């Protein structure tokens, strides 16, 4: 009976993780990439989707250690360490979503973090696309805000409060919106 339960749990876990793994394994874009920026974007996307697939597994593993610890402080500490390092890894991966934009700025001499408008902005402009929190600057906080709302679409209960996160206007918050914000990372308005 236990073997059947394990098989069912593995099938459920695999079916839950399949979309993440499919997104991570898309190899076509790296073959079709025409610039270093596109190659970096493909690699960062691979790492991002792989991390999103592995994080739940690590949390389940930590829960297993915690539930089977029987009061053993060593197993409890192992569970805590697994959760801690999984969260740190997810934080680093989320930071990594902005790396292509930063590298592009360095290579192309794009807008710096200093005051003043970025390219294409008028001095009197009060906002810039991608500035989600309204601080007049596109930074990691804006990218994190969009990333946390991925898959929210028109008709969802909280759509009215986050519809301005839909930067491309396709009525769903997706990775395209994150990429738009990442591409204008560092832009400021006056």
Image (cartoon, rainbow, N blue to C red):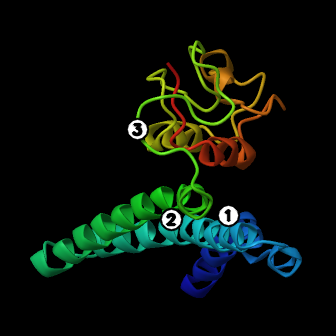
Dot 2 corresponds to which residue? Answer: 56
* Mark 1 and mark 3: Cα distance apart in space: 44 Å
Q: Tell me the element at label 3.
A: loop
Marks 1 & 3, CB-CB < 8 Å contact: no
Q: In screen coordinates, is 32 left or right of 68? A: right
In the picture of the structure, the residue carrying the numbered disc 3 is 114
Q: Which mark is residue 68?
A: none
Task: Say which label, 1 or 3, has the lower sequence index.
Answer: 1
Q: Give me the residue at 62% from left, 23% from top.
A: 162
CA distance separating discs 2 and 1:
10 Å
In the picture, the disc for residue 16 is: 1
Above or below — where is 125 with respect to 128? above
The residue at 22%/75% (across/down) is 69
Q: Position of residue 77 (x, y in %)?
A: 17, 73
Task: Give the x, y percent position of residue 86.
Answer: 38, 67
Between residue 51 and residue 121, name the one nearer to us.
Answer: 121
Whether residue 70 is visible to the viewer of this picture, yes or no, is no
Which of the two marks, 1 or 3, is nearer to us in this view?
3
Image point 60% across, 17% down: which residue? 161
Q: Earlier in the sequence, mark 2 or mark 3?
A: 2
Q: Position of residue 53 (x, y in %)?
A: 59, 68
């Amino acid at each position: 009976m236990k073997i059947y339960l394990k098989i069912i749990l593995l099938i459920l876990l695999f079916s839950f993780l399949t979309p993440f793994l499919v997104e991570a394994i898309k190899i076509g874009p790296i073959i079709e990439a025409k610039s270093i920026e596109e190659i970096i974007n493909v690699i960062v996307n691979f790492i991002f989707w792989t991390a999103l697939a592995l994080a739940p597994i690590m949390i389940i593993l930590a829960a297993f250690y915690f539930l089977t610890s029987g009061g053993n402080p060593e197993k409890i500490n192992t569970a805590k360490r697994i959760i801690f390092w999984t969260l740190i890894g997810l934080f680093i991966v989320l930071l990594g979503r902005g790396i292509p934009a930063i590298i592009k700025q360095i290579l192309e001499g794009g807008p710096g973090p200093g005051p003043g408008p970025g390219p294409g902005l008028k001095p009197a402009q009060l906002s810039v696309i991608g500035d989600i929190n309204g601080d007049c600057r596109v930074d990691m906080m804006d990218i994190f805000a969009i990333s946390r709302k991925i898959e929210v679409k028109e008709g969802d209960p909280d759509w009215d409060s986050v519809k301005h996160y839909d930067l491309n206007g396709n009525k769903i918050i997706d990775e395209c919106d994150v990429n738009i914000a990442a591409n204008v990372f560092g832009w400021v308005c006056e």
